[in-house]
Amino acid sequence: MGTTSIQKHFLDTSVVRPLLLGTDSYKQYLKSQFKDEPCYISRFVQMEIKRSFLINIMSFYFMIRLNTMPTVSDALKYWSNKFKTSELKAIIQLAAVILRWRDIDFNSTADKPKALRELGRYIKRIECKLRRYFKDIGRDSTRCARAAIPLKADPSDIATGFKNFFEAFNDEETCKTKCRIDRFLLERYPSEIRKYVLYADEQPTNNDTKGFKKISEKLKGLLEKGTKLCSCRLCESIGDAVIALDSPRNMILEHIDKAFDYLCPIIKQPHKKHRPEISF
Amino acid sequence: MTDTSARTETNLTEAFLPEGLRGQELEHLNWDEYKREITTRRPTGQEEKEAKWQITRGQTGYIEEVEGERLSTSIATVVPIGSGLEKQFIQTSEEVVETVDRAEPQVNHILRVHFISQILTDLRQIQKYISKPEAAIYADSLLLTMRTMDEISPFDPFIEIVMAFHDALAYKNNWNKYSPDQYEGAYQILKEFVQKQNISSDTVEKAIMRFEKLGFETTPFDLDMEFKVDSEKD
């Protein structure tokens, strides 16, 4: 009698994000790809979602809360005029969807507290799902201190909870004293990083290789300058490499980003690239 | 917490209901009939601001006003008579303050049980009519009861569980896509958690994840496509 092994999936940030924030049809597509098999994420992936999404939507929460913004509409207009990146524009688009759907009058001062309550609840729920919806891979190789910062927000005083989280998350100096990204990259995986740098140098620059080459350029700098270059900012630019190296080799790394098509084969990490949401 | 020393209490019946109805038991009224917005103008320095109060179903009690020198606008919340609930949203000239719910946990528990009993009844009923037009009757009742609960006890931790379920049902009329088994699962979750006297954040999270495991999408809102395009370039 043969034994059937269950395939395990390790999800990159580019897959976790649409599973939390994507359209219903795309979520269903991704879930169908993993069937009912276990999906894992790492603390580093959690941190990337917190940095790229939670911190931004929390900032918008405080933008609404400002007493200089009499209404939600004022906050939306201000944010829209000041912040032009697609990532930040998407935040207010999402907030507007949530608030409009809950019958918030964007032009009413009276509706501001309700808007804050709704947005606060949504943020807490996303953070909860990030921690609890996926399985943890059971190891924390980078010891990313930012990833370990808890979000504790009492319903009666959500703002204080958000502020405490935000300040701890952005306290890079303290986080740096706890994190082990330097050891992870330079002591555990130096040969893999050299392979990345060498391979990137051989590749032509095009749309497919652009992301990988950008990461390799940063890794090249790290090899030259050593641990003093390690920072939260560095992790922001080499996140895909950290995720690839940290992936359990007995799991399939599920991703959408193109950089993994280069990062994974070099280290013999099984991986699968999924159709992007835009193709739906 | 905000100082509420300058407080006036206005009986809801005296203030806003037609004369013939004054003194009646408010909970027996058809609230949809008396649903309206009341606009009051109050002096705020050189100008006047509006405070809008909306009476909706389930709000029985008095309106509590908070006044003070620094207030530019005051917003009243209708709270149940004798419930011990006291909460106001106050927008001052300097900051928006959300005051904490000072209701006794026991009061919260009584309110939860009251509303959840209606929700549980509707959850059983809706299972009989899945994929039939009649399901809308119970979906409407479910969503309305949950929203009423939110209006009355917005800071009760239990409401976070209820509203997570609410969002899973309400957004894009998703109530229509769930199966009788899923509704029965939701029934069991709410029945189990409403019995808990103390609701911690861990309790809330566990309940929400139970809904998620049943297939109820508690964060159904979509993110802008532009962001998705961007993320794919990495």
Image: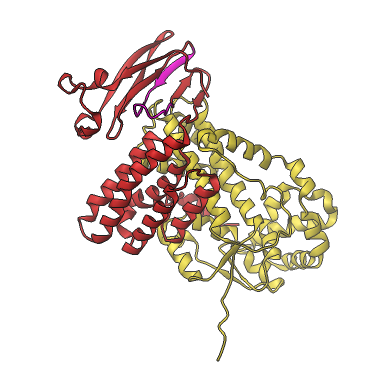
Q: Which is nearer the eye, A100 or B99?
A: B99
Residue B197 is at least partly visible in this image: yes
Quarter placement of the C terminus of chain A? bottom left
Q: Which residue is at 52% across, 71% downward?
A: A37
Residue B22 position by quadrant: top left
Q: Residue furthest left?
A: B20
Residue A83 magenta: no
Count the labels in the image: 0
| Residue A157 place in picture, x, y as percent | 54, 33
Residue A101 position by quadrant: top left
Q: Which is nearer the eye, A92 or B63?
A: B63
A165 in relation to B37, above or below: below
Residue A21 is at least partly visible in this image: no
Asked whether, in this view, residue A60 is left or right of residue A268, the answer is left
In the rendering, what colour is chain A? yellow
Asked whether, in this view, residue A95 is left or right of residue B30, the answer is right
| Residue A224 place in picture, x, y as percent | 84, 56
| Residue A255 place in picture, x, y as percent | 57, 64
Quarter placement of the N terminus of chain A? bottom right
In the rendering, what colour is chain B? red
Q: Which residue is at 31% across, 26% downward?
A: B61
| Residue B84 place in picture, x, y as percent | 41, 28
Q: Which region of the structure is painted magenta?
A: B70-86
Query: Colour mode?
Result: by chain
Q: Which is nearer the eye, A14 or B213?
A: B213
Q: Which residue is at 34% across, 49% downward?
A: B170
